[in-house]
Image: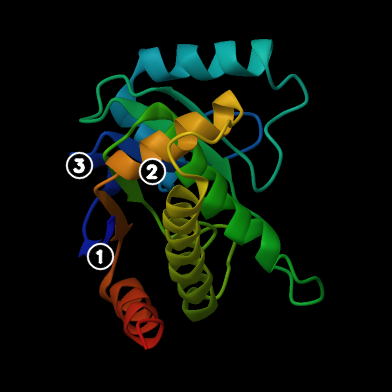
């Protein structure tokens, strides 16, 4: 069973096999004070090169909002960076499904890679201005529902049932995933995520 944990700290300082990056669709470094900018600054040229190659070979039109893709992690204390493009909050347009998709597809990519530990930021709560309490509820609910669905799938499929290779890799990876760690940047965010985690336990 995968543990879902919460820490107050700096994402780029985390020791985890995969770090989730709140990226932009062009996969280039964001502003210096953003998660994306901080990750690129710490990871160095290796990450910049990997992102360029990913864009050139797979995402010529950019990585779509709500989708995720992995690269190497450069100088970070991780094996991979999983880039996901969060939606910008709009009071007139409900984009909750896109925010949920960021967490779900990030976990899917992590599982396919076989990552045992995954560190995740509060996606879209910075420059994209998503209300923190709502973002926390979406994040916690999506992660828990995704992990629960994998557990159910594993029990249901049985050892001899044929699967496509992608699903088989994801299921095997999910089995080895030990921790999904929310990493938040201040006490207000910590309280929002802690409240969401407690509320969704019941």
* Residue 166 in the figure: left or right of residue 141: right
| Quarter of the image with the C terminus in it | bottom left
On screen, 172 above or below 123? above
On screen, 30 above or below 144? above
For disc 1, the marked residue is: 6
Distance, label 3 to label 2, CA atoms, is 24 Å
For disc 2, the marked residue is: 174
For residue 77, the mark is none
Toward the viewer: 168 or 90?
168
On screen, 116 above or below 180? above
For disc 3, the marked residue is: 13
Where residue 18 sits, quadrant-wise, is top left
Element type at marker 3? helix
At x 61%, y 59%, the residue is 99
Q: Residues within 10 Å of mark 3 (few under 14, many from 20)?
A: few
Q: Residues within 10 Å of mark 1 (few under 14, many from 20)?
A: some
Distance, label 2 to label 1, CA atoms, is 19 Å
Residue at the extreme right of the image, as rendered: 92
At x 48%, y 71%, the residue is 141
| Quarter of the image with the N terminus in it | bottom left
**Discs 2/1, front:** 2
* Residue 28 in the figure: left or right of residue 107: right
Q: Are marks 2 and 1 in contact (CB under 8 Å)?
A: no
**Discs 1/3, front:** 1
Element type at marker 2? helix
Toward the viewer: 188 or 31?
188
């Amino acid at each position: 069973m995968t543990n879902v944990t919460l820490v107050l700290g700096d994402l780029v300082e985390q020791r985890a096999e995969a770090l989730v990056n709140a990226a932009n669709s062009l996969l280039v470094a964001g502003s210096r004070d953003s998660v994306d900018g901080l990750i690129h600054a710490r990871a160095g040229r290796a990450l910049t090169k990997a992102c360029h190659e990913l864009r050139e070979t797979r995402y010529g039109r950019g990585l779509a909002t709500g989708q995720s893709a992995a690269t190497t992690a450069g100088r970070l204390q991780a094996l991979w960076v999983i880039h996901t493009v969060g939606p910008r909050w709009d009071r007139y347009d409900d984009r909750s499904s896109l925010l949920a998709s960021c967490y779900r597809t990030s976990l899917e990519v992590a599982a396919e890679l076989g990552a045992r530990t995954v560190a995740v930021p509060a996606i879209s709560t910075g420059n994209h201005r998503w209300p923190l309490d709502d973002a926390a509820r979406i994040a916690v609910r999506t992660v828990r529902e995704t992990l629960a669905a994998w557990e159910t799938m594993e029990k249901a499929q049985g050892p001899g049932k044929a699967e496509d290779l992608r699903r088989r890799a994801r299921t095997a990876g999910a089995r080895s995933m030990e921790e999904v760690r929310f990493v938040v940047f201040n006490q207000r965010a910590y309280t929002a995520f802690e409240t969401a985690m407690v509320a969704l336990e019941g």
